[in-house]
Amino acid sequence: MDYKNFWLSILRRLEPTISRSQFLTWFQNTAALTIENETLVVGAPTNFAREWITRKYALKILQAAEEENSKIKEVEFEVDAALEDGIDPRTIDLRAVFAKPGDKKIYKARGREEVVLTRSGILSAKLNPRYTLANFVPGDENRLAHAAALSVSRTPGLTYNPLVIYGGVGLGKTHLLSAIGHEVLTNDPNKIVAFTTSEIFTREFVLASKKFKADEFKKKFRDIDILLFDDVQFLENREKTQTELFNIFNDLHQKGKQLVFTSDRPPSELTELMDRLRSRLTWGLVCEIEQPSFHSRLEILKNKTRERRVILDPELLEFIAMNVTNSVRELESALAWTTAQTDLLRTQPTIRELGRMLEKINKKERMLGLPESAPEISIRTPAEIIELVSKHFNLPVTEICGVSRKKEFRTARQIAMFLSREILGCGLAEIAKNFNRDHSTVLHSCRRISAELQKNEALIRHVNAVKKEMGL
Protein backbone atom coordinates (compact mmCIF):
# COMPACT_ATOMS: atom_id res chain seq x y z
CA MET A 1 0.00 0.00 0.00
CA ASP A 2 1.18 3.52 -0.79
CA TYR A 3 0.97 4.98 2.73
CA LYS A 4 2.21 8.40 1.65
CA ASN A 5 -0.65 8.94 -0.81
CA PHE A 6 -3.09 7.44 1.66
CA TRP A 7 -1.96 9.95 4.30
CA LEU A 8 -2.19 12.76 1.75
CA SER A 9 -5.82 11.80 1.07
CA ILE A 10 -6.55 11.98 4.79
CA LEU A 11 -4.84 15.36 5.06
CA ARG A 12 -6.95 16.69 2.18
CA ARG A 13 -10.05 15.78 4.18
CA LEU A 14 -8.66 17.32 7.37
CA GLU A 15 -7.32 20.58 5.95
CA PRO A 16 -10.71 22.35 5.46
CA THR A 17 -11.79 21.47 9.04
CA ILE A 18 -8.74 22.91 10.87
CA SER A 19 -7.38 26.45 10.99
CA ARG A 20 -4.52 26.91 8.55
CA SER A 21 -1.94 27.84 11.18
CA GLN A 22 -2.82 24.81 13.33
CA PHE A 23 -2.86 22.48 10.33
CA LEU A 24 0.56 23.59 9.06
CA THR A 25 2.05 23.50 12.55
CA TRP A 26 0.88 20.14 13.85
CA PHE A 27 0.68 18.00 10.71
CA GLN A 28 4.00 19.03 9.18
CA ASN A 29 6.48 16.10 9.29
CA THR A 30 3.77 13.54 10.11
CA ALA A 31 3.22 10.33 8.17
CA ALA A 32 1.12 7.19 7.96
CA LEU A 33 3.45 4.42 9.10
CA THR A 34 1.39 1.29 8.63
CA ILE A 35 -2.03 -0.34 8.94
CA GLU A 36 -2.19 -3.33 11.27
CA ASN A 37 -5.31 -5.26 12.32
CA GLU A 38 -7.69 -2.48 11.26
CA THR A 39 -5.53 0.11 13.05
CA LEU A 40 -3.85 3.02 11.28
CA VAL A 41 -0.53 3.91 12.88
CA VAL A 42 0.39 7.59 12.45
CA GLY A 43 3.92 8.85 13.07
CA ALA A 44 4.71 12.22 14.70
CA PRO A 45 8.19 13.77 14.94
CA THR A 46 8.18 14.47 18.71
CA ASN A 47 6.40 13.41 21.88
CA PHE A 48 4.90 16.88 22.19
CA ALA A 49 3.44 16.73 18.68
CA ARG A 50 2.13 13.20 19.23
CA GLU A 51 0.38 14.15 22.47
CA TRP A 52 -1.14 17.29 20.95
CA ILE A 53 -2.42 15.52 17.82
CA THR A 54 -3.79 12.66 19.90
CA ARG A 55 -5.64 15.02 22.21
CA LYS A 56 -6.93 17.46 19.62
CA TYR A 57 -7.33 15.63 16.33
CA ALA A 58 -7.56 11.85 16.93
CA LEU A 59 -11.31 11.70 16.21
CA LYS A 60 -11.03 13.82 13.05
CA ILE A 61 -8.20 11.62 11.76
CA LEU A 62 -10.15 8.43 12.48
CA GLN A 63 -13.22 9.77 10.66
CA ALA A 64 -11.12 10.80 7.64
CA ALA A 65 -9.32 7.44 7.63
CA GLU A 66 -12.62 5.52 7.73
CA GLU A 67 -13.87 7.55 4.78
CA GLU A 68 -10.78 6.55 2.83
CA ASN A 69 -10.73 2.92 4.00
CA SER A 70 -13.81 1.48 5.71
CA LYS A 71 -11.74 -1.35 7.23
CA ILE A 72 -9.92 1.06 9.57
CA LYS A 73 -11.50 1.08 13.03
CA GLU A 74 -8.79 2.66 15.19
CA VAL A 75 -5.91 5.13 14.99
CA GLU A 76 -2.74 4.96 17.08
CA PHE A 77 0.06 7.51 17.26
CA GLU A 78 3.78 6.84 17.61
CA VAL A 79 6.87 9.02 17.81
CA ASP A 80 9.28 8.49 14.92
CA ALA A 81 12.35 10.69 15.39
CA ALA A 82 13.37 10.13 11.74
CA LEU A 83 10.47 12.38 10.70
CA GLU A 84 11.79 15.38 12.65
CA ASP A 85 14.17 16.87 10.09
CA GLY A 86 11.49 17.07 7.38
CA ILE A 87 13.46 15.22 4.69
CA ASP A 88 12.09 11.74 5.36
CA PRO A 89 10.45 10.50 2.13
CA ARG A 90 7.35 9.43 4.07
CA THR A 91 6.48 13.03 4.97
CA ILE A 92 4.55 15.56 2.91
CA ASP A 93 5.55 19.20 2.41
CA LEU A 94 2.29 20.79 3.54
CA ARG A 95 3.26 24.32 2.57
CA ALA A 96 3.91 23.19 -0.98
CA VAL A 97 0.92 20.85 -1.38
CA PHE A 98 -1.57 23.12 0.38
CA ALA A 99 -0.15 26.43 -0.84
CA LYS A 100 -2.45 29.47 -0.79
CA PRO A 101 -2.16 32.70 -2.79
CA GLY A 102 0.11 35.16 -0.98
CA ASP A 103 1.98 32.51 1.02
CA LYS A 104 5.62 33.29 1.63
CA LYS A 105 7.85 30.92 -0.27
CA ILE A 106 10.07 28.44 1.51
CA TYR A 107 13.20 27.42 -0.32
CA LYS A 108 15.78 24.74 0.34
CA ALA A 109 19.41 25.80 0.39
CA ARG A 110 22.48 23.61 0.41
CA GLY A 111 23.02 21.56 3.52
CA ARG A 112 19.26 21.20 4.06
CA GLU A 113 19.22 24.69 5.56
CA GLU A 114 15.77 26.20 5.18
CA VAL A 115 15.61 29.91 4.46
CA VAL A 116 12.73 32.34 4.23
CA LEU A 117 12.79 34.76 1.33
CA THR A 118 10.83 37.99 1.83
CA ARG A 119 9.92 40.48 -0.84
CA SER A 120 13.16 42.33 -0.11
CA GLY A 121 15.28 39.20 -0.22
CA ILE A 122 16.33 38.78 3.43
CA LEU A 123 17.58 35.29 4.22
CA SER A 124 17.02 33.73 7.63
CA ALA A 125 18.97 30.71 8.83
CA LYS A 126 16.82 27.72 9.74
CA LEU A 127 15.63 27.61 13.34
CA ASN A 128 16.98 24.57 15.13
CA PRO A 129 14.04 22.11 15.24
CA ARG A 130 15.24 20.73 18.59
CA TYR A 131 15.07 24.11 20.33
CA THR A 132 11.48 24.81 21.38
CA LEU A 133 9.79 26.22 24.46
CA ALA A 134 8.16 22.84 24.99
CA ASN A 135 11.48 21.10 25.67
CA PHE A 136 13.18 23.99 27.50
CA VAL A 137 13.46 23.13 31.20
CA PRO A 138 12.71 26.20 33.34
CA GLY A 139 14.33 26.52 36.77
CA ASP A 140 15.16 29.23 39.26
CA GLU A 141 18.25 30.15 37.24
CA ASN A 142 16.36 30.88 34.00
CA ARG A 143 12.70 31.35 34.96
CA LEU A 144 12.57 35.07 34.14
CA ALA A 145 14.21 34.56 30.75
CA HIS A 146 11.82 31.70 29.94
CA ALA A 147 8.76 33.75 30.97
CA ALA A 148 9.97 36.73 28.94
CA ALA A 149 10.55 34.51 25.89
CA LEU A 150 7.01 33.16 26.21
CA SER A 151 5.62 36.69 26.54
CA VAL A 152 7.33 38.14 23.46
CA SER A 153 6.38 35.01 21.48
CA ARG A 154 2.70 35.59 22.18
CA THR A 155 2.70 39.36 21.68
CA PRO A 156 5.79 40.25 19.62
CA GLY A 157 6.68 43.93 19.69
CA LEU A 158 4.18 44.77 22.43
CA THR A 159 5.82 43.72 25.69
CA TYR A 160 9.60 43.66 26.15
CA ASN A 161 11.30 45.22 23.17
CA PRO A 162 14.13 44.61 22.86
CA LEU A 163 14.59 41.45 24.94
CA VAL A 164 18.22 40.74 25.82
CA ILE A 165 19.18 37.34 27.27
CA TYR A 166 22.72 36.96 28.58
CA GLY A 167 24.75 34.26 30.30
CA GLY A 168 27.71 31.93 29.94
CA VAL A 169 28.41 29.44 27.16
CA GLY A 170 26.07 26.48 26.83
CA LEU A 171 23.36 27.62 29.26
CA GLY A 172 20.47 27.79 26.79
CA LYS A 173 20.51 31.28 25.28
CA THR A 174 20.43 30.08 21.68
CA HIS A 175 17.80 27.50 22.64
CA LEU A 176 15.48 30.25 23.88
CA LEU A 177 16.23 32.43 20.87
CA SER A 178 15.29 29.69 18.43
CA ALA A 179 12.30 28.70 20.60
CA ILE A 180 10.91 32.22 20.33
CA GLY A 181 11.01 31.93 16.55
CA HIS A 182 9.23 28.57 16.60
CA GLU A 183 6.55 29.83 18.97
CA VAL A 184 5.90 32.97 16.91
CA LEU A 185 5.52 30.91 13.73
CA THR A 186 3.30 28.41 15.54
CA ASN A 187 0.95 31.21 16.54
CA ASP A 188 1.12 32.92 13.14
CA PRO A 189 2.88 31.12 10.25
CA ASN A 190 2.71 34.30 8.16
CA LYS A 191 5.14 36.14 10.42
CA ILE A 192 8.61 36.70 8.99
CA VAL A 193 11.27 35.66 11.49
CA ALA A 194 14.91 36.49 10.75
CA PHE A 195 17.45 34.52 12.78
CA THR A 196 21.07 35.58 12.47
CA THR A 197 24.35 35.68 14.37
CA SER A 198 27.05 38.35 14.68
CA GLU A 199 29.25 36.33 12.35
CA ILE A 200 26.61 35.90 9.63
CA PHE A 201 25.43 39.51 9.93
CA THR A 202 28.98 40.86 9.68
CA ARG A 203 29.91 38.63 6.75
CA GLU A 204 26.84 39.62 4.75
CA PHE A 205 27.29 43.31 5.55
CA VAL A 206 30.99 43.29 4.52
CA LEU A 207 30.10 41.51 1.28
CA ALA A 208 27.34 44.04 0.56
CA SER A 209 29.72 46.93 1.30
CA LYS A 210 32.32 45.60 -1.12
CA LYS A 211 29.69 45.50 -3.83
CA PHE A 212 28.47 49.00 -2.90
CA LYS A 213 25.11 47.58 -1.86
CA ALA A 214 25.05 48.56 1.83
CA ASP A 215 21.76 50.43 1.39
CA GLU A 216 20.18 47.36 -0.18
CA PHE A 217 21.41 45.29 2.75
CA LYS A 218 19.58 47.53 5.21
CA LYS A 219 16.42 47.61 3.10
CA LYS A 220 16.23 43.82 3.23
CA PHE A 221 15.30 44.01 6.92
CA ARG A 222 12.32 46.29 6.45
CA ASP A 223 9.85 43.47 5.79
CA ILE A 224 10.66 41.28 8.78
CA ASP A 225 8.49 40.99 11.90
CA ILE A 226 11.03 39.56 14.38
CA LEU A 227 14.82 39.87 14.45
CA LEU A 228 16.59 37.18 16.48
CA PHE A 229 20.26 38.13 16.90
CA ASP A 230 22.65 35.65 18.54
CA ASP A 231 25.94 36.59 20.27
CA VAL A 232 25.81 40.37 19.83
CA GLN A 233 29.06 40.65 21.87
CA PHE A 234 31.04 39.61 18.80
CA LEU A 235 30.23 42.95 17.17
CA GLU A 236 32.57 44.69 19.60
CA ASN A 237 35.28 46.69 17.79
CA ARG A 238 33.37 46.44 14.49
CA GLU A 239 32.24 50.03 14.24
CA LYS A 240 30.72 50.01 10.76
CA THR A 241 28.77 46.83 11.41
CA GLN A 242 27.53 48.26 14.71
CA THR A 243 26.33 51.37 12.91
CA GLU A 244 24.41 49.24 10.45
CA LEU A 245 22.77 47.25 13.24
CA PHE A 246 21.97 50.51 15.06
CA ASN A 247 20.11 51.82 11.99
CA ILE A 248 18.23 48.54 11.52
CA PHE A 249 17.38 48.52 15.22
CA ASN A 250 15.88 52.01 15.00
CA ASP A 251 13.90 51.19 11.87
CA LEU A 252 12.39 47.98 13.27
CA HIS A 253 11.74 49.36 16.75
CA GLN A 254 9.88 52.37 15.37
CA LYS A 255 7.65 50.00 13.40
CA GLY A 256 6.88 47.97 16.52
CA LYS A 257 8.79 44.91 15.35
CA GLN A 258 10.23 42.56 17.96
CA LEU A 259 13.99 42.43 18.57
CA VAL A 260 15.68 39.74 20.67
CA PHE A 261 19.42 39.58 21.37
CA THR A 262 21.69 37.16 23.22
CA SER A 263 25.06 37.95 24.72
CA ASP A 264 27.62 36.46 27.07
CA ARG A 265 27.48 39.61 29.24
CA PRO A 266 24.90 42.24 30.18
CA PRO A 267 24.81 45.27 27.82
CA SER A 268 26.48 47.47 30.45
CA GLU A 269 29.62 45.32 30.19
CA LEU A 270 29.81 45.39 26.39
CA THR A 271 32.20 48.32 26.62
CA GLU A 272 33.43 48.02 23.03
CA LEU A 273 29.95 48.57 21.61
CA MET A 274 29.10 52.15 20.68
CA ASP A 275 27.25 53.95 23.47
CA ARG A 276 24.06 54.55 21.49
CA LEU A 277 23.70 50.88 20.51
CA ARG A 278 24.52 49.68 24.02
CA SER A 279 21.93 52.10 25.39
CA ARG A 280 19.23 50.79 23.08
CA LEU A 281 19.85 47.24 24.20
CA THR A 282 18.67 48.31 27.66
CA TRP A 283 15.38 49.85 26.47
CA GLY A 284 13.40 46.69 27.08
CA LEU A 285 14.12 43.79 29.42
CA VAL A 286 17.53 42.32 30.22
CA CYS A 287 17.49 38.75 31.64
CA GLU A 288 20.31 36.58 32.91
CA ILE A 289 20.56 32.80 32.57
CA GLU A 290 22.72 31.34 35.33
CA GLN A 291 24.25 27.90 35.72
CA PRO A 292 21.53 25.32 36.38
CA SER A 293 21.09 23.84 39.86
CA PHE A 294 21.38 20.12 40.56
CA HIS A 295 17.62 19.64 40.32
CA SER A 296 17.48 21.56 37.03
CA ARG A 297 20.39 19.56 35.62
CA LEU A 298 18.70 16.30 36.59
CA GLU A 299 15.41 17.40 35.01
CA ILE A 300 17.25 18.42 31.83
CA LEU A 301 18.84 14.97 31.62
CA LYS A 302 15.50 13.26 32.16
CA ASN A 303 13.97 15.43 29.47
CA LYS A 304 16.80 14.59 27.05
CA THR A 305 16.43 10.85 27.64
CA ARG A 306 12.72 11.14 26.85
CA GLU A 307 13.54 12.98 23.64
CA ARG A 308 16.08 10.31 22.66
CA ARG A 309 13.67 7.57 23.70
CA VAL A 310 16.24 5.81 25.87
CA ILE A 311 16.02 4.50 29.42
CA LEU A 312 19.05 4.88 31.65
CA ASP A 313 19.67 3.84 35.21
CA PRO A 314 18.46 6.79 37.37
CA GLU A 315 21.71 6.53 39.35
CA LEU A 316 23.65 7.35 36.17
CA LEU A 317 21.55 10.47 35.55
CA GLU A 318 21.99 11.60 39.16
CA PHE A 319 25.74 11.00 38.93
CA ILE A 320 26.02 13.10 35.76
CA ALA A 321 23.89 15.88 37.26
CA MET A 322 26.04 15.87 40.40
CA ASN A 323 29.37 16.13 38.57
CA VAL A 324 28.71 18.05 35.34
CA THR A 325 27.94 21.57 36.52
CA ASN A 326 29.28 24.05 34.00
CA SER A 327 26.71 24.03 31.20
CA VAL A 328 23.78 22.28 29.57
CA ARG A 329 26.05 21.54 26.62
CA GLU A 330 28.39 19.50 28.82
CA LEU A 331 25.40 17.66 30.26
CA GLU A 332 24.36 16.69 26.74
CA SER A 333 27.90 15.55 25.95
CA ALA A 334 28.03 13.28 29.00
CA LEU A 335 24.58 11.92 28.20
CA ALA A 336 25.61 11.29 24.59
CA TRP A 337 28.59 9.20 25.77
CA THR A 338 26.38 7.20 28.11
CA THR A 339 23.75 6.47 25.45
CA ALA A 340 26.45 5.64 22.90
CA GLN A 341 27.92 3.14 25.34
CA THR A 342 24.45 1.66 25.71
CA ASP A 343 23.70 1.58 21.98
CA LEU A 344 27.05 0.38 20.70
CA LEU A 345 28.14 -1.98 23.47
CA ARG A 346 24.61 -3.14 24.32
CA THR A 347 25.13 -2.60 28.03
CA GLN A 348 24.89 0.46 30.23
CA PRO A 349 28.01 1.79 31.94
CA THR A 350 28.34 1.54 35.69
CA ILE A 351 28.93 4.54 37.93
CA ARG A 352 32.62 3.65 38.03
CA GLU A 353 32.94 3.50 34.22
CA LEU A 354 31.02 6.75 33.82
CA GLY A 355 33.17 8.35 36.51
CA ARG A 356 36.38 7.44 34.68
CA MET A 357 35.04 9.04 31.51
CA LEU A 358 33.93 12.23 33.28
CA GLU A 359 37.26 12.50 35.08
CA LYS A 360 39.00 12.65 31.69
CA ILE A 361 36.62 15.30 30.38
CA ASN A 362 36.28 17.45 33.49
CA LYS A 363 39.81 16.80 34.77
CA LYS A 364 38.58 16.67 38.36
CA GLU A 365 40.62 15.12 41.12
CA ARG A 366 37.62 13.26 42.47
CA MET A 367 34.08 12.70 41.26
CA LEU A 368 31.23 13.09 43.74
CA GLY A 369 29.32 9.89 44.43
CA LEU A 370 32.06 7.64 43.07
CA PRO A 371 32.85 4.51 45.13
CA GLU A 372 36.10 4.94 47.02
CA SER A 373 37.63 1.72 45.77
CA ALA A 374 36.74 -1.21 43.57
CA PRO A 375 35.50 -4.37 45.27
CA GLU A 376 38.27 -6.89 45.77
CA ILE A 377 36.82 -9.47 43.45
CA SER A 378 37.99 -10.96 40.19
CA ILE A 379 35.44 -12.68 37.99
CA ARG A 380 36.91 -14.74 35.16
CA THR A 381 34.52 -17.61 34.43
CA PRO A 382 30.79 -18.11 33.79
CA ALA A 383 30.63 -20.22 36.95
CA GLU A 384 31.82 -17.26 39.03
CA ILE A 385 29.23 -14.98 37.39
CA ILE A 386 26.52 -17.54 38.17
CA GLU A 387 27.61 -17.46 41.81
CA LEU A 388 27.52 -13.65 41.85
CA VAL A 389 24.06 -13.51 40.25
CA SER A 390 22.89 -16.15 42.72
CA LYS A 391 23.91 -13.94 45.66
CA HIS A 392 22.40 -10.81 44.09
CA PHE A 393 18.97 -12.40 43.57
CA ASN A 394 19.26 -14.68 46.64
CA LEU A 395 18.48 -17.70 44.48
CA PRO A 396 20.13 -21.16 44.53
CA VAL A 397 22.71 -21.83 41.85
CA THR A 398 20.96 -25.13 41.12
CA GLU A 399 17.78 -23.28 40.16
CA ILE A 400 19.61 -20.73 37.98
CA CYS A 401 21.21 -23.60 36.06
CA GLY A 402 18.12 -25.78 36.34
CA VAL A 403 15.08 -26.26 34.12
CA SER A 404 12.54 -24.10 35.98
CA ARG A 405 10.73 -21.54 33.78
CA LYS A 406 9.64 -19.35 36.69
CA LYS A 407 10.26 -15.72 35.91
CA GLU A 408 12.73 -15.02 38.72
CA PHE A 409 14.90 -18.01 37.77
CA ARG A 410 14.68 -17.30 34.04
CA THR A 411 15.65 -13.63 34.49
CA ALA A 412 18.66 -14.45 36.70
CA ARG A 413 19.74 -17.17 34.29
CA GLN A 414 19.57 -14.86 31.26
CA ILE A 415 21.43 -12.06 33.04
CA ALA A 416 24.24 -14.49 33.94
CA MET A 417 24.43 -15.68 30.33
CA PHE A 418 24.44 -12.10 29.04
CA LEU A 419 27.24 -10.97 31.36
CA SER A 420 29.29 -14.06 30.58
CA ARG A 421 29.19 -13.17 26.91
CA GLU A 422 29.35 -9.36 27.04
CA ILE A 423 31.78 -8.86 29.93
CA LEU A 424 33.92 -11.99 29.89
CA GLY A 425 33.69 -12.52 26.13
CA CYS A 426 33.01 -16.23 26.52
CA GLY A 427 31.86 -18.26 23.52
CA LEU A 428 28.33 -19.61 23.21
CA ALA A 429 29.48 -23.21 23.64
CA GLU A 430 31.37 -22.49 26.86
CA ILE A 431 28.43 -20.60 28.36
CA ALA A 432 25.96 -23.30 27.27
CA LYS A 433 28.04 -25.95 29.01
CA ASN A 434 27.92 -24.07 32.33
CA PHE A 435 24.13 -23.75 32.16
CA ASN A 436 23.36 -27.20 30.76
CA ARG A 437 21.82 -25.58 27.68
CA ASP A 438 22.52 -25.50 23.95
CA HIS A 439 24.15 -22.51 22.27
CA SER A 440 20.90 -21.36 20.61
CA THR A 441 19.29 -20.89 24.03
CA VAL A 442 22.27 -18.81 25.17
CA LEU A 443 22.11 -16.66 22.04
CA HIS A 444 18.38 -16.08 22.50
CA SER A 445 18.90 -15.12 26.17
CA CYS A 446 21.67 -12.66 25.33
CA ARG A 447 19.60 -11.02 22.62
CA ARG A 448 16.58 -10.78 24.89
CA ILE A 449 18.51 -9.10 27.72
CA SER A 450 20.18 -6.75 25.25
CA ALA A 451 16.79 -5.68 23.88
CA GLU A 452 15.20 -5.35 27.31
CA LEU A 453 18.05 -3.11 28.51
CA GLN A 454 16.74 -0.48 26.10
CA LYS A 455 13.41 -0.18 27.90
CA ASN A 456 13.34 -2.04 31.23
CA GLU A 457 14.57 0.15 34.10
CA ALA A 458 14.37 -2.63 36.69
CA LEU A 459 16.54 -4.91 34.55
CA ILE A 460 19.05 -2.09 34.06
CA ARG A 461 19.39 -1.76 37.84
CA HIS A 462 19.95 -5.51 38.28
CA VAL A 463 22.58 -5.73 35.55
CA ASN A 464 24.46 -2.67 36.81
CA ALA A 465 24.33 -3.93 40.39
CA VAL A 466 25.98 -7.21 39.36
CA LYS A 467 28.57 -5.35 37.30
CA LYS A 468 29.43 -3.24 40.35
CA GLU A 469 30.06 -6.41 42.31
CA MET A 470 32.40 -7.47 39.51
CA GLY A 471 34.45 -4.32 40.12
CA LEU A 472 33.34 -2.53 36.97
Image (tube, rainbow, N blue to C red):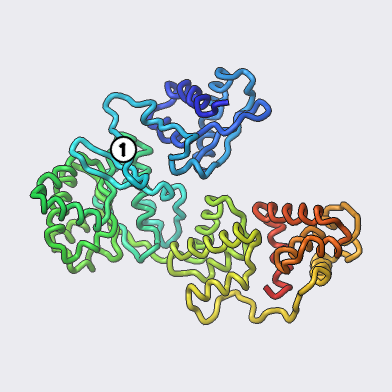
Between residue 272 and residue 451, name the one nearer to us: 451
Q: Return the x and y of residue 182 as percentages of the image width and height.
A: 37, 44
Q: Which residue is mark 1?
A: 107
Task: Please indicate whether residue 114 sits to the left or right of residue 349 in the image.
Answer: left
Residue occupying image coordinates x 57% and y 34%? 33
Residue occupying image coordinates x 49% and y 39%? 49
Residue occupying image coordinates x 41% and y 62%? 141
Crowd band around label 1 with a 10 angstrom C-alpha radius: few (<14), some (14–19), many (20+): few
Residue occupying image coordinates x 61% and y 75%? 370
Rendered-image quadrant of the C terminus:
bottom right
Between residue 155 and residue 394, name the one nearer to us: 394
Q: Return the x and y of residue 18 as percentages of the image width and height.
A: 43, 26
Work out whether 48 lies above or below 55: below
Residue 267 in sight in this render:
yes
Q: Quadrant of residue 73?
A: top right
Task: Please indicate whether residue 445 sits to the left or right of residue 229 in the image.
Answer: right
Q: Return the x and y of residue 103 as percentages of the image width and height.
A: 29, 29
Residue 22 in sight in this render:
no
Q: Return the x and y of residue 24 as percentages of the image width and height.
A: 40, 32
Rendered-image quadrant of the N terminus:
top right
Amino acid type indicated by mark 1 = Tyr
Work out whether 275 lies above or below 443: below
Work out whether 142 lies above or below 392: above
Task: Please indicate whether residue 415 sits to the left or right of residue 159 in the image.
Answer: right
